Amino acid sequence: MICLILLVFSFFSVQSLENIIGRGSYRVTNLQQCEGYEQHLFNLDLHRRKMNRTHDGFNGVLKIETRLDDSYGIEIKVCKFVDGGCKPFTVLKDESFTKFVEYHIGKNVEKILSAAGVEPARFPIEPCEKKITGYLFSYEELPHAGLYGSFHCHTTVLQRNGDDNEVVGCLDVTFEFKANNDIKII
């Protein structure tokens, strides 16, 4: 009898997980600079345009007032949209902004730096103000499995000062991860 109860519980647990986690695709729905961005050392002002289901195009401005290297950290506060608002979900932190971005965004880092005319298209980046044109972001290069839903990320670049970290760059990104219901996965 206990085995039957466990089997039924396992079945319903797996069924409910299919509605939470699975295969799908990401889509950025909003990008905006944070309040007070004018005072930051690093600014990325991007405007998105939909290209197709696997790519978005971005144009904008990259402004760097001091050398951007791995002496800066990163913190991303993620909340998940649910009934009643956006509830805190997780916080991602790393001592090295550049290593974090290169690892998690991959080839898209080189692409955006190239679209901005940064040579060489890798970190560290010397002070500059560059116009970004024709940056094509590939969602195909992101993981194909994830947690379904809509999320907001408050991303900050941090200048490490011992226990205190000063915000020197910020970008708010809203994205969603949805099941690919129109694609049959075998």
Image: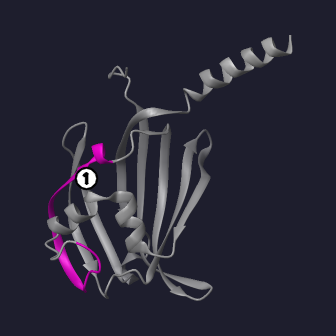
Q: Quadrant of the C terminus?
A: top left
Q: Nearer the viewer, residue 167 or 22?
A: 22
- Please check the rendered image and state whether residue 128 is part of the magenta-colored stretch, yes or no: yes
Look at mark 1 in the image and give the residue it sits on.
48
The percent position of residue 5, horizontal first and vertical second, equals 80, 15
Helix, strand or loop under label 1: strand
Q: Is residue 19 above or below residue 95?
A: above
Residue drawn 62% across and 24% down? 14
The residue furthest front is 3
Which segment is the magenta one?
Answer: 122-141
Residue drawn 36% across and 61% down? 32
Residue 2: which quarter of the image? top right
Q: Using a 10 Å C-alpha cutoff, classify the residue at mark 1 as few (fewer than 14 neighbours), some (14 to 19) or many (20 or more).
A: some
The residue furthest right is 1
- Please check the rendered image and state whether residue 49 is part of the magenta-colored stretch, yes or no: no
Q: Is residue 153 above or below residue 55?
A: below
The percent position of residue 77, horizontal first and vertical second, equals 54, 61
Residue drawn 38% across and 65% down? 101
Q: Is residue 37 left or right of residue 131?
A: right
